[in-house]
Structure formats: C-alpha cells, structure tokens
Amino acid sequence: MRIGELATRVGLSRDSLRFYEEVGILTSERQPNGYRDYSPEAVPWLEYVRTAQALGFSLAEIAEHGRELNETPDQAAALSALFADKIRIIDNRMAELAALRAELTARVGTDCPLRKQPAPVARAGRRSGFRG
C-alpha cells in the first residue's frame, strides 16, 4: 500500500511515516516510480508502535526491541520482561524525582533558593569537627 493509504489507516501523518522509516521503525519497498510500498503488516506494527509509545517506550527502544521480538519464539514472555525492565526504570526515576522534590521543597522560602544549602547540623553527642 502507498504512504497515503497507510497514513489514513493508522491515523498518522505521511511525515511521521517517513520519519519512522528514517529511524528504522518502519520499512518499505521502493517502486520503480519512486513511491514507497508498505506491506499490510505495517498496520498492526504501527498500532504496536503507538501503544508502546503510550506506555513510555522511546522510538529507539521500540526499534531495538522490535528486532528482538521478531526473532524470539515467545513474544509474550519477551514483552513481559521488557515491561518489568521498564517498571524498574520508572521506579528509579520516581525515586530520583522524589529526592529532587524534597530538595526543592527545602529551598522554598529561603533567602536565596539557588545558594548552596548548609550542611545539616551534627546531632548532639557527635563531634562536628567545629572548634568553638
């Protein structure tokens, strides 16, 4: 099928399809007249791509894992493993964001929020290294 028909069927622009081809997400055959010809399998593949993007996967990840998934006999298990990895990445990012939020919250209302914050005061009974 030609690019216009594919674009209509999957709800993407022609530019998006060209970009997907450029980054290796999508392939086509060139006809003698230079037009792109896409296989019928491009439709479910692009639906997969859009779903994967909605689930937080980058185009680079989709391209990389798409090749891997085509070569694996148990795609469901492979996808489950990819999802588990993505969950770990999200959990780590959430922890980083929580620490960043705490840092920002501690700086709200200070004289100069961008100034380096003083080190925490040593607890009673501990030597702080300060002679005074």
Image (cartoon, rainbow, N blue to C red):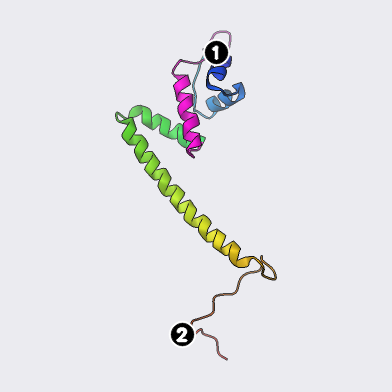
Residue 33, magenta (yes or no): yes
Task: Name the quadrant containing residue 82.
Answer: top left
Q: Residues within 10 Å of mark 2 (few under 14, many from 20)?
A: few
Q: Residue at x 35, y 38 (%)?
A: 80
Considering only vertical position in the picture, is 106 above or below 24? below
Residue type beneath disc 2:
Arg
As drawn, which residue projects farthest toward the right?
111
Q: Residue at x 50, y 28 (%)?
A: 24
Helix, strand or loop under label 1: loop
Considering only vertical position in the picture, is 100 above or below 73? below
Give how far across and how far down residue 53 sits, in percent: 50, 35
Q: Residues within 10 Å of mark 1 (few under 14, many from 20)?
A: some
Q: Residue at x 48, y 82 (%)?
A: 123
Q: Is residue 41 left or right of residue 16?
A: left
Residue type beneath disc 1:
Arg
Q: Residue at x 66, y 66 (%)?
A: 113
Helix, strand or loop under label 2: loop
Give how far across and how far down residue 51 sits, in percent: 47, 32
Q: Give, as a single range, the part of the protein colored magenta.
A: 31-58
In primary-sequence order, the first of circles 1 and 2 is 1
Quadrant where the C terminus is found in the figure: bottom right
Q: Circle 1 is placed at which residue position?
A: 2
Determine contact: label 1, label 2, CB under 8 Å: no
Residue sitting nearer the eye, 33 or 104: 104
Give the spatial CA distance, label 1 vs label 2: 75 Å
Q: Is residue 84 left or right of residue 59?
A: left
Give how far across and how far down residue 97 sits, in percent: 52, 55
Residue 59, magenta (yes or no): no
Considering only vertical position in the picture, is 117 above or below 124? above
Give how far across and how far down residue 23 sits, in percent: 53, 30
Q: Circle 2 is placed at which residue position?
A: 126
